[in-house]
Amino acid sequence: MDRQAATENATNATFEIHEADDPEAETLIAGFSEFALAGLTAADYLVEALDLEPTGYVTTRDLPTITPFDDGTPRHPVRLFTAESVPVVVLVSEQFVPVTAARSFTDALLSWAERADVPETVVLSGVQMPHAERDHRTFYVATEDYRRARLADAGVPPMAAGLTDGVKASLLARGIDSPLRACVYATPVHAQAPDAEAALRLVETVDDVYDLGIDTGPMESFAADVQRHYRDLAARVERAREDQQPDDRMYM
């Protein structure tokens, strides 16, 4: 498949969400395959730390397929995780979602969230940008209603200025003029994949905002366990970005 055909397929991509039960949660927290994989690693760790179980998955016929596996057992690349008495549902997306497919992915995800009565969506993300050591912290870009509900007493600063694209941009745009509360928690990342320190900052922020009682101690060893898998995934993400996107407009 040439680059033009791949881009056209991504633009027309459709997604289906399959779930066993509606979650008893108010917030969807998502991590995606993108530069340095900090958000994906953080979401993966939330699943482990909160002892969440897989309860759904997302499929599409229109993007190049990856099938991750552990110990010889395959799994869907985009999965939903929940547990009783845990106020969040976590989406882990090892499938790269190109910019051209972001709107259709967002439409499918938010249609499901509305049916499941999940009014709040959060994306965990690493920011590829020059930065100093003092910038190693988490920032937010959030709709006004999310700020009122979650950030009034939180010590998370806003990101000063810039733009975003892809699924993050689509979710934030949908939240501006709708009841959806939307937020992107972003932190600067380095080129290594995964950037475990950046992922740890994102996990700590989620824990502080939602008071989940997460033990972040095992994060370092957890990141080491997944580093080999995600290093290969990062290479695939970069190749997919080159194939699917005519130019690199990602600022956060």
Image (cartoon, helix red, strand yellow):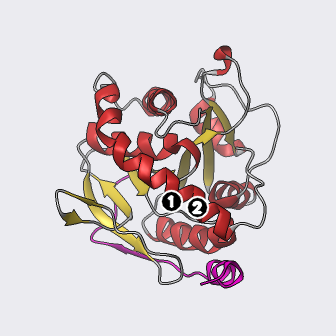
On the image, the x and y values in percent for residue 22 come to: 34, 65
Q: Is residue 3 above or below residue 76?
A: below
**In the drawing, does residue 94 fall left or right of residue 120?**
left
User: The residue tagged with tag 2: helix, strand or loop?
Assistant: helix
| Amino acid tagged 1 | Arg
Is 153 in front, or is 213?
213
Q: Which residues are magenta?
A: 1-26
Residue 188 image offset from top left, x and y in percent: 63, 31
Residue 127: percent from left, percent from top: 65, 38
**Amino acid type, callout 2:** Arg
Q: Which mark is residue 239?
A: 2
Count residues near mark 1 (Cα–Cα under 10 Å), then give few for <14, some for 14-19, many for 20+. Answer: some
Q: Is residue 13 magenta?
A: yes
**CB-based contact (under 8 Å), mark 2 and mark 1:** yes
Residue 236 shows which numbered tag? Answer: 1
Who is closer to the viewer here, 29 or 211?
29
